Image (cartoon, rainbow, N blue to C red):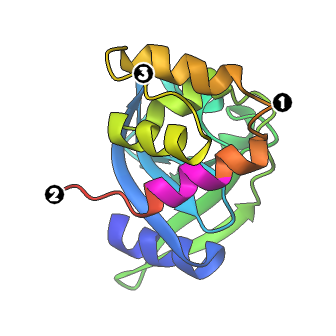
């Protein structure tokens, strides 16, 4: 369902960049969606064959990293998914009708109140962090670890780097990320 889902997400969220299979905490995000609205969305896919066994841990991990979270579920989960994800998570249902995948926005995602900048900044690669440092007139810290640099960027919030500026910078870099 991934390719039709990507089309559905673009139709509903506009110009987006899709990053697949991103490790975050003890879980792996099925999809990380970067929006031109300067938000990063975590998307968890639960097929009809999946169980809810890991979902509570996944919810905790997603909540640390993303501005918004969405769960995509097959018809067997559609009636009970609301019991398993917080009310601010979006829910998209998917079903197969006459050989065609059909998506329905069951519930719009709301801003995630549990996002932690300390976690979110770890989505960035070292060269991307260097660009953020450059854009914000920070020292280069060339001999320091990635974690050290992440901490230094976060320390500047919100006095020297506003949340909105950092969100915009991160999304710009993720949108243009080159895997070559």
Q: Residues within 10 Å of mark 2 (few under 14, many from 20)?
A: few
Q: Is 29 placed above or below 57 here?
A: below
Q: Residue 64 sits in which quadrant?
A: top right
**Residue 17: percent from the left, percent from the top?**
45, 65
Residue drawn at the location 68% of the way across and 67% of the way down: 105
The residue carrying mark 2 is 180
Q: CA distance from mark 1 to mark 3?
A: 20 Å
Q: CA distance from mark 2 to mark 1?
A: 35 Å
Mark 3 vs mark 2, foreground winner is 3
Q: Residues within 10 Å of mark 1 (few under 14, many from 20)?
A: few
Which of the numbered marks, if any, corresponds to residue 159? Answer: 1
**In-image side of 46 versus 154 (left or right):** left
Which residue occupies the foreground of this view, 154 or 22? Answer: 154
Q: Is 25 placed above or below 34 here?
A: above
Residue 60 visible in this rendered orientation of the protein? no
Q: Which residues are magenta?
A: 168-173
Residue drawn at the location 57% of the way across and 32% of the way down: 138
**In-image side of 91 versus 1 (left or right):** right
Which residue occupies the foreground of this view, 116 or 59? Answer: 116
The residue carrying mark 3 is 141
Q: Are marks 1 and 3 in contact (CB under 8 Å)?
A: no
Mark 3, secondary structure of its residue: loop
If you read the primary sequence from the N terminus, does the residue marked by circle 1 or circle 3 appear first?
3
Residue 93 visible in this rendered orientation of the protein? yes
Which residue occupies the foreground of this view, 108 or 161? Answer: 161
If you read the primary sequence from the N terminus, does the residue marked by circle 3 or circle 2 appear first?
3
Q: Residue 179 sits in which quadrant?
A: bottom left
Q: Residue 75 sits in which quadrant?
A: bottom right
Q: CA distance from mark 3 to mark 2?
A: 25 Å
Q: Principal SS element in the magenta part?
A: helix
- Farthest left residue in view: 180
**Residue 177: percent from the left, percent from the top?**
35, 57
């Amino acid at each position: 369902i991934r390719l039709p889902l990507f089309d559905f997400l673009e139709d509903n969220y506009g110009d987006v960049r899709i990053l697949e299979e991103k490790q975050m905490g003890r879980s792996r995000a099925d999809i990380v969606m970067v929006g031109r609205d300067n938000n990063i969305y975590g998307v968890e896919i639960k097929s009809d064959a999946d169980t809810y066994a890991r979902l509570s841990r996944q919810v905790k991990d997603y909540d640390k990293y993303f501005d918004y979270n969405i769960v995509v579920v097959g018809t067997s989960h559609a009636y009970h998914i609301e019991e398993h994800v917080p009310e601010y998570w979006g829910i998209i249902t998917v079903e197969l009708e006459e050989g065609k995948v059909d998506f329905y926005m069951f519930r719009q995602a709301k801003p995630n109140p549990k996002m932690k900048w300390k976690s979110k900044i770890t989505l960035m690669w070292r060269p991307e962090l260097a660009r953020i440092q450059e854009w914000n007139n920070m020292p280069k810290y060339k001999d320091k670890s990635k974690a050290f640099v992440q901490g230094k960027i976060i320390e500047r919030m919100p006095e020297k780097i506003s949340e909105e500026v950092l969100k915009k910078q991160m999304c710009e870099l993720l949108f243009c990320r080159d895997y070559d």
